[in-house]
Image: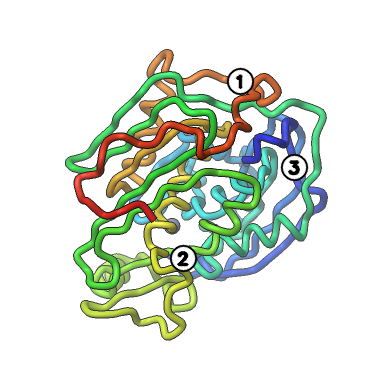
Amino acid sequence: MTLAQRNQHTIRRPVRCHGVGLHSGAPIAMTLKPAPVHHGVRFVRKDAGDHLPLLAHHRNVINTFHATSIGFNGVSVSTIEHLMAALYGSGVDNVVVELDGPEVPIFDGSASPYLDLVREAGLQEQEAPRRCLSIQKTLVVNEGEAFIKASPANRFHVRYGIDFAHPLVGKQEITWTFSPGSFGRDIAPARTFGFLKDVQRLQSMGLAQGGSLQNAVVFDDYGLLNSEGFRYNDECVRHKILDFIGDLALAGLPLVGRFEVYRAGHSLHSLFLKQLLAKPGTCRIFTPVSYAPAFIPSAALTPFMEPFPHSAGTV
Ligand SMILES: [Zn+2]
């Protein structure tokens, strides 16, 4: 989502890749293809017979357990969030995603490989203005102590906090503002993460069958199993922002606002988006051409005033 790009964009040419599904463990081929204006992101399961392309939209979310899945009329696609974040972060509005399996390939557990695919395909500007959604009123959605608060702003800001009882994770907090290039630099490389005991439990449930140290950061009770270490000291909270962006992309239009998120996950991200779009007056559609304030320096913006429940400093 680059507001400077005022028109919609698709990709210049088809690109194809192969990978493994994180939860299914199945080898999967994926092809991204150009699409016309106002098409959005639509998935086609080549292995599922004739079906209507499945629109990446919050109304089609059918499962948020350890991944975000969409489905309609018996056809589903799971683990879409990292690809959705990469498309959102690189400004692709319209694309067809063809798969020959039930899941988007996980690659290295981050969004960087999808960004590389978009770079390989190239961006194509289209003859229609991009429309965005701006937050108009404060909205807070919570589940226990986890919460998401949205409020008006003139850029996409997110402040995310997590708190895991693990010596290498603990309390992490980051405030991040979208700007051209910042997604690929600050967020996209952050890999998904998990705890060995949870991975073993998921595998006993038939999930995480493709999970490995090649596509996730995995912790045991005391340390990190990945010999290569972290990509960032706070890689976990950065990955949570990646997931949040991927789930917000299911609004169907880029969002502009300030988001404070604490200890959330796919389920709360999805619930928040449904409430945000269902409540009259909470957001409005605009085109960036009428939105000059989006370009004022972020340092001039009002800082967050309320501290998170913990006292970790902003990174
Ligand atoms: Zn993720």
Distance in Å between CA atoms under marks 3 and 1:
20 Å
Q: Quadrant of ligand 1?
A: bottom left
Toward the front, the furthest residue is 300
Q: Quadrant of residue 127?
A: top right
Residue placed most toward the observer, 20 or 118: 118
Mark 2 and mark 3 residues within 8 Å of each other at the beta carbon:
no
Of label 3 and label 1, which has the lower sequence position? Answer: 3
**Where residue 138 sits: x, y (%)?**
35, 23
Q: Is residue 243 left or right of residue 161?
A: right
Residue 312 x, y percent position in the rendering: 26, 54
Report if residue 210 is visible in the image: no
In the image, what residue type sits under mark 3?
Thr
**Secondary-structure class at tag 2:** loop
Across and down, in percent, residue 88 comes to 59, 44
Q: Which residue is mark 3?
A: 10
Coordinates of residue 194 in the picture (x, y in percent)? 33, 67
- Give the residue type that dot 2 points to: Arg
Q: Which label's residue is closer to the chain start, 2 or 1?
A: 2
The residue type indicated by label 1 comes to Phe
Q: Quadrant of the C terminus?
A: bottom left
Residue wearing tag 1: 286
Find residue 191 and name its label: 2
Image side of residue 111 versus residue 271, left or right: right
